[in-house]
Amino acid sequence: MILTDRELFLLIICTVFYITIFILVLQTNRRKIQLLQSRLDNIHAMQKMAVMEPRQQNVNIIFSSPVYLRIKDYLKEEKNMNDSDWSELDEIVNKAYSGFSEKLFSLYNMSVQDYHVSLLIKIRLQPKDIATLTAHSKESVSSTRSRLYHKVFGKKGSTKDWDDFILSI
């Protein structure tokens, strides 16, 4: 079969187009892999730093804080936390675990809801209690936890995987 000049030209154009698309897809995937590798390196570094911190002292700072005691009262009364409670909790968690919020936000730009859930995980609250304090359903809290794991690590994970990660940093 003999191709006309026009058909040959179109074949060459199509081939160049497909090769260009293929190269762009490869470059995009390479960048995604580099980003995920960078995130994993950050996560490993954070976990190594967290192992060096005296954990029991951190827990005592949180569990003896006024905001933690108020949170326990809110759970008994099934009340939500207010903005000043969130600010105080953020402050006490970052005091006990230096740079906690910076570490999280360096991995993923979280929404307020995402960060609140992560803070409450860090102080070892159960999902049903997190749902009460954030005025969301237990299913919404579960969805947030598994979604965050996927966003940060780039792979599917369980809610427990996210909890374990939060407790490790």
Image (cartoon, helix red, strand yellow):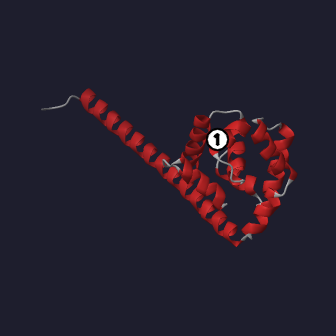
Q: Quadrant of the C terminus?
A: bottom right
Q: Residue at x 66, y 63 (%)?
A: 46
Residue ranking furthest to the left: 1
162 to the left or right of 114: left
79 to the left or right of 14: right
32 to the left or right of 101: left
Residue linked to disc 1: 128
58 to the left or right of 157: right
Q: Quadrant of the N terminus?
A: top left
Residue 17 coordinates in the image, percent (x, y): 38, 36
Towards the viewer: 31 or 138 = 138
Question: Pointer 1: residues within 10 angstroms few (<14), some, or many (20+)?
Answer: some
Secondary structure under tag 1 reads: helix
Q: How many marks?
A: 1
Is residue 114 in view from this perspective?
no
Is residue 15 in view from this perspective?
yes
Residue 146 coordinates in the image, percent (x, y): 55, 44
Residue 5 coordinates in the image, percent (x, y): 25, 29
Residue ranking furthest to the front: 76
Q: Against 38, is 150 above or below?
A: above
Q: Against 154, is 128 above or below?
A: above
Towards the viewer: 166 or 126 = 126
Q: What kind of residue is marked 1?
A: Lys
Q: Residue at x 61, y 37 (%)?
A: 138
Q: Residue at x 49, y 49 (%)?
A: 155
Residue 102 coordinates in the image, percent (x, y): 74, 54
Q: Residue at x 30, y 30 (%)?
A: 10
